[in-house]
Image: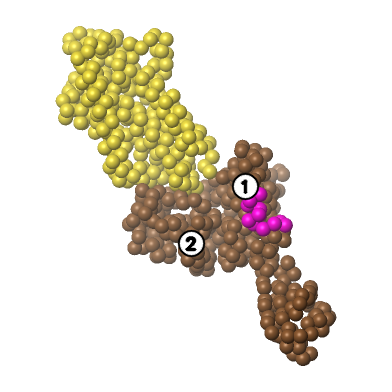
Amino acid sequence: MIHWTAVAVMWLREMKRFLRARSRIVGALAMPLFFLAFMGLGFNRMAVPGLAGGAAGGAAAGTHSLSYLRFLVPGIIGMSMLFTSTFAGLSVLWDREFGFLKEIMVAPVSRVSLVLGRIAGGTTTTLIQGLLLLSVSIVLGFRPGSWAGLVPAVLFMFLIAVTFIGLGLVFASNMKDMQGFSIIMNFIMFPLLFLSGALYPMKNLPVWLRPLSYADPLTYGIDGMRATLLGVSMFSAALNLAVLAGFSLLMVVLGAYFFEHSESV
Amino acid sequence: MREEIISEQAAGASAGDAIWVENLTRTFGDLRAVDSITFSVPSGELFGLLGPNGAGKTTTLNMLSTLLKPTSGRALVAGYDVSRHRDRVRQSIGIVFQEPALDGKLTGRENLEFHAMMYGLDRDTRRRRIEEVLALVELTDKAKVLAEKYSGGMKRRLEIARGLVHRPRVMFLDEPTLGLDTQTRRHIWDYIKKLNRETGVTIILTTHYMEEADYLCHRIAIMDQGRFVAQDTPSNLKDLLGGDVVSLEFENRAEEMLAAAQKLDWIKKAKQHDGCLSLTMERGERRIPELISLAQGMGITVTCVLLRKPSLEDVFLHFTGRTIREQEASLAERHRGHPHGRPGRGR
């Protein structure tokens, strides 16, 4: 059973906290912008093979060549959203640390409502950050292939957020405290980033890594954004959308399941 | 079939009781944090769980508030089973946890607002109740300050206010004055008394401060190593020790007085040392005049009188053979020996 008021309250709390943490927003934007600026400018003059994409993008790539900087923009947006949304899911651990989790757990509402509220809140804040990043990129000179492509690109951003908040919830529900944080950072988050092809074309990776890349939800999120924003991608936008939507659903269900079965004290 | 009979018995036993608990047990690995406790608390009572850290008080509270599942046994809170009707139980209770459970990034009022919405109160009721509870704990003028800026005592008061917003039938207070200074502690005590008197809410509190349990509670259960070793009113518990000790000092002829005292049937123990007598009796304050007139009748002059009431510390000592502080020290030892136990959570 879903208590919609509880979902709304959880969302509202997240918004208030977000708006009060201005420095957090600035910090979350600065890091990816530095990446974009330095990596983009540093590698822009180099010939990175495979930028123009694979099968689906082949035709489009023939007509115009793609600079590394443009290639990088969707990747950096995906990267920043990967981290922000996983941390939003992991924020359960902060609530546990500060005791507030007990207040939430003892409320007469279903755990599913709490999970949905958290996902709604985290998705909103992550999406705001992703959109800010995209806007700044546009201000700085990034031009999407077609402006109409922005709409489906936002849909991909939304699904990336939902997927990784779900993943964060799965971790948080199985951890007692922040001890395992660096393990998750080093052994889950960075591999997810590097396998996804955010910073370079995925098919430049060794073939034996490819199954892992295909299992990485972020691969489809970033490839989907490239398809819609640049018109250049490995898979079609529709395929990316279908796979990513599947992942996001799976992660929400898993996150809700583990949160439901976690001990609250 | 059997299940039905058990639940009927339970319903019968719990009529009018805010809490009804039978053989409640919780284990963590091979540690029996709560070991088959049985008790009930009538509506409107202020009931205390007294014991050293690690005795199982918080674990008991966590089970009663549905945060922990019991390993075995049954517990009804406000008439609802904590295992089977968790939402009903949650709707009926308010809790103040041992550690602060506030969102520091929200203001005092927003913390209350969050709570009130979670408990499904409509806008008007929310506004009215929040004003009400803020006034009760005297935080109205601090309502717009972020909770992280509150002092320890203010945080505790805000949490008490929050626990009341949805008008619970039962309120749990886990070590409500732990870590507060003496003055603030007095303050919180007065709030708790006022709360119980004015709203009629049943209050269950845990504490390891003897004087707190003595001052606040109508009835007390003394808990040690997961078990109840005694439960009664503070004064009855203290009477169990045989009563008060009256010490009398005489100018002379203390021996004659001793002989006379030993003939009185209400004196349970009489001891003489130097010119002093130590007499054990119930309700010593009422017997002192009698003793003095007895001495005067015999021409003996009393120079000094001292009345000592047994404290709950003495009671704890009586039932467990050690003081609370010794008990805490030895528990700490045990936990050091068992790194896989959960000392931090097994309270």
Q: Quadrant of residue B273?
A: bottom right
| Chain for disc number 1 | B
Q: Residues within 10 Å of mark 1 (few under 14, many from 20)?
A: some
Tell me: residue B312, above or below residue A5.
Answer: below
Q: Is residue A14 magenta?
A: no
Chain assigned yellow: A
What stretch of residues is rendered in magenta?
Answer: B320-330
What is the x, y in percent for residue A74? 27, 23
Q: Where does label 1 land, which residue?
A: B332
Image point 72% across, 61% down: which residue?
B318
Tell me: residue B264, above or below residue A233.
Answer: below
Secondary element at image label 2: loop
Can I make out residue A120 in this image?
yes
Q: Is residue B278 left or right of residue B152?
A: right
Q: Where does label 2 land, which residue?
A: B181
Q: Distance from label 2 to label 1 (Cα)?
A: 24 Å
Residue type pointed to by label 1: Ala
